C-alpha cells in the first residue's frame, strides 16, 4: 500500500493537488522503528559495535521508508582518514521485514492466479508472470548488497554525463541489511520553491529528467524503476562546472532492465512518435508485443494517424482545454476500437510503465506546461545521427521512415490480398456502423423490456401462493429492467 501511495503521490498530472499533497509524505517517511532495534541490526550485520563502526549516528531517521530507514552518520576516524570521506548516510532494513515481504508476496501470488482465471485480465496480460516479476524485484530490494551493485552499474552507465550523479558505496560498512553511502542530500526535485530560490530553472530540470529517463530506456537498457520525487535530488553546481545543476538518484533497490530486443523495439517506437508516423507506430507496437493478436491494425493506424495530426506536439495544459465535443466525435468515429482496446501488457513492461508514469507526474509538478514532444524530438534525433546538423537530422529521420515503410510493404500487400481472398476486406463507414449498433441496441432493449414485464407480472401473481418463487421472479426482473434502461446509452 505504501508503494501504491508513493506512485499516486507523483501523479500531479492526473490527480488533484490536495490528494497528492497528502500522499507525498509516503515518499519520505512512514512510522519508524526504534533506534535501539536499528542499532542491533547494524551490530549484527557489521560484526562490530555501531560506535566502533561509526564515530556518530544521529538517532532520528532522515527517512523511514516501507522497507528500511536512513540515518545521517560520520565514519570512524581511521576509515574517514583512509577514504577522505566523513559524512555518510546509513540505510538499515527494518527488523523482520523479510518475513513480512514473504507473507505479502505469497498472498499476491494467489491473487495473480485468481486474476489469470478472469478472461478480461488473462487476455491482456499474464498476471502470474507480472507477480513473479514484482516478487523478484522486491526480494532484490531487501538485499542491500544487490542494491549497491545496481548503484555502481547505474553510475558506470552515466560516468561521462555531467548532469547525472549517484552516491558512492562505502563497502567497508555495508552488508546485506546495512548499506552505507556518501551523503548526497540536496533539494528534493519536486520542491519548486527551493529550486527557484537556488537559481535553478524548474523547466530545465523537467527537461533534463526526461532526457535522463529516455537515456535509461532507449540506450543503456538499465533504468531506475522507482523515480518518485523522494528518490531524486537536484544540486546547484558552482560556476565553471560542466553543468549548472545535477540530478542525483538514490535508492537503487527497484531497477528494471530492457533486453536488447525490446530496446530495439522501443527505439523504433520512439522514432515513430518523433516523426508522427502512425504506420510505424503500429508496427513498433506489434514488435513489442503490446497489441492483442486480434487487434484491427488498419483501424488502429487510422486512429493514431488522426491523433498525431490533431494532438502531435500539443502541451498537457492544452489537452485539458480540448473541446469535449471534439473528443466525443473522435470517440464516435473509433468507438469500436475504444470498446475493444486491443492492447496487452507484456510482463517486461510493468516497471517500465511505472517509471514512465512517475516521470510524467514529476515533470508536470516542475512545469505544468511541460511538452513531452519537445523532449522526444531532440532525443530521437540524437539517436539517429548524434549531433549532426538539423538538415542531416531530417534526412536521417525521413530515410529511416521510408526504409521502415518499404520493409513492411510486402507484408501489408500480402495481408490485403489474404483479406480479399477470404472476403474479409470491407469498406468502413463509421456512421452506418453507428446506426446499425443503435438499431441492434433498440431491439435488445425492447426484448429486455418484454422479459422484465413477464417476470414482474409472474412475480406479482405468484406472491400470494408462493412467496419464495414470487419474490425471486420480482428480484430477477430487475436485471432485464436495468439492461433495458441502460443499453445503448454509449452507442448513440
Image (cartoon, rainbow, N blue to C red):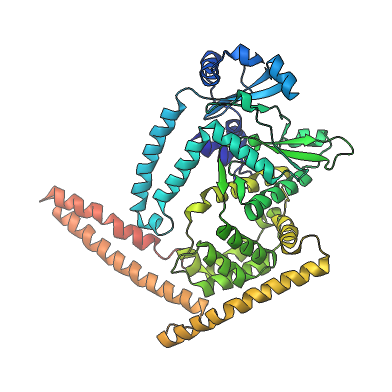
Residue 281 screen position, x and y as percent:
60, 67
Q: Nearer the viewer, residue 285 or 119?
A: 285
Q: Is residue 14 left or right of residue 452?
A: right
Q: Residue at x 80, y 69 (%)?
A: 392
Residue at the (84%, 42%) spot, across then down: 242
Give the residue displayed 30% in from the left and 65% down from the top: 448
**Please, is residue 8 above or below residue 274 in the view?**
above
Q: Residue 297: image x %, image y %?
A: 52, 72
| Image coordinates for residue 186, horizontal then vertical, percent | 74, 31
Residue beneath the point at 65% across and 61% down: 270
Observer-nearest of 91 and 378: 91
> Against 74, is 407 above or below?
below
Is residue 408 among the parts visible in the rendering? yes
The answer to whether residue 58 of the structure is visible from this angle is no
Residue 325, x across and y down, in percent: 61, 64
In this view, the residue in front, 180 or 422, is 180
On screen, residue 420 versus residue 251, left or right, reads: left
Amino acid at each position: 500500500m505504501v508503494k501504491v501511495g508513493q506512485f499516486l503521490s507523483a501523479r500531479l498530472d492526473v490527480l488533484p493537488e490536495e490528494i497528492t499533497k497528502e500522499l507525498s509524505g509516503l515518499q519520505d517517511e512512514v512510522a519508524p522503528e526504534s533506534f535501539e532495534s536499528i542499532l542491533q541490526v547494524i551490530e549484527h550485520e557489521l560484526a562490530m559495535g555501531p560506535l566502533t563502526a561509526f564515530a556518530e549516528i544521529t538517532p532520528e531517521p532522515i527517512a523511514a521508508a516501507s522497507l528500511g530507514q536512513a540515518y545521517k552518520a560520520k565514519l570512524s576516524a581511521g576509515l574517514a582518514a583512509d577514504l577522505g570521506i566523513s559524512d555518510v548516510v546509513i540505510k538499515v532494513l527494518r527488523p523482520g521485514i523479510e518475513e513480512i515481504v514473504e507473507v505479502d508476496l505469497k498472498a499476491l501470488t494467489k491473487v495473480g492466479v485468481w486474476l489469470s482465471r478472469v478472461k478480461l485480465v488473462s487476455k491482456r496480460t499474464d498476471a502470474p508472470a507480472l507477480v513473479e516479476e514484482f516478487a523478484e524485484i522486491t526480494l532484490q530490494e531487501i538485499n542491500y548488497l544487490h542494491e549497491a551493485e545496481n548503484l555502481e552499474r547505474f553510475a558506470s552507465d552515466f560516468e561521462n554525463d555531467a548532469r547525472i550523479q549517484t552516491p558512492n558505496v562505502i563497502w567497508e560498512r555495508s552488508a546485506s541489511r546495512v548499506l552505507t553511502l556518501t551523503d548526497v542530500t540536496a533539494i528534493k526535485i519536486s520542491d519548486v520553491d527551493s529550486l527557484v530560490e537556488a537559481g535553478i530553472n524548474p523547466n530545465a530540470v523537467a527537461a533534463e529528467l526526461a532526457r535522463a529517463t529516455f537515456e535509461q530506456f532507449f540506450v543503456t537498457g538499465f533504468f531506475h524503476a522507482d523515480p518518485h520525487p523522494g528518490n531524486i535530488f537536484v544540486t546547484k553546481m558552482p560556476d565553471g562546472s560542466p553543468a549548472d545543476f545535477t540530478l542525483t538518484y538514490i535508492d537503487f533497490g527497484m531497477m528494471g532492465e530492457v533486453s536488447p530486443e525490446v530496446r530495439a523495439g522501443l527505439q523504433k517506437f520512439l522514432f515513430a512518435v518523433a516523426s508522427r508516423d502512425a504506420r510505424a507506430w503500429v508496427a513498433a507496437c506489434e514488435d513489442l508485443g503490446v497489441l492483442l493478436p486480434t487487434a484491427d491494425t488498419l483501424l488502429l493506424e487510422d486512429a493514431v494517424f488522426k491523433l498525431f495530426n490533431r494532438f502531435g506536439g500539443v502541451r498537457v495544459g492544452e489537452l485539458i482545454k480540448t473541446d469535449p465535443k471534439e473528443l466525443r466525435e473522435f470517440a464516435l468515429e473509433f468507438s469500436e476500437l475504444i470498446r475493444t482496446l486491443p492492447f496487452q501488457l507484456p510482463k517486461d513492461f510493468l516497471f517500465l510503465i511505472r517509471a514512465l508514469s512517475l516521470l510524467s507526474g514529476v515533470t508536470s509538478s516542475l512545469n505544468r506546461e511541460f511538452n513531452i514532444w519537445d523532449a522526444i524530438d531532440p532525443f530521437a534525433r540524437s539517436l539517429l545521427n548524434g549531433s549532426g546538423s538539423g538538415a542531416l537530422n531530417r534526412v536521417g529521420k525521413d530515410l529511416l521512415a521510408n526504409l521502415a515503410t518499404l520493409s513492411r510493404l510486402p507484408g501489408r500487400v500480402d495481408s490485403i490480398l489474404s483479406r480479399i481472398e477470404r472476403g474479409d476486406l470491407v469498406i468502413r463507414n463509421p456512421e452506418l456502423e453507428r446506426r446499425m449498433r443503435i438499431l441492434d441496441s433498440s431491439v435488445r432493449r425492447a426484448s429486455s423490456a418484454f422479459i422484465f414485464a413477464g417476470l414482474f407480472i409472474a412475480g406479482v401473481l405468484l406472491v400470494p401462493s408462493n412467496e419464495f418463487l414470487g419474490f425471486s421472479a420480482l428480484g430477477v426482473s430487475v436485471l432485464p429492467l436495468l439492461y433495458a434502461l441502460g443499453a445503448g446509452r454509449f452507442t448513440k
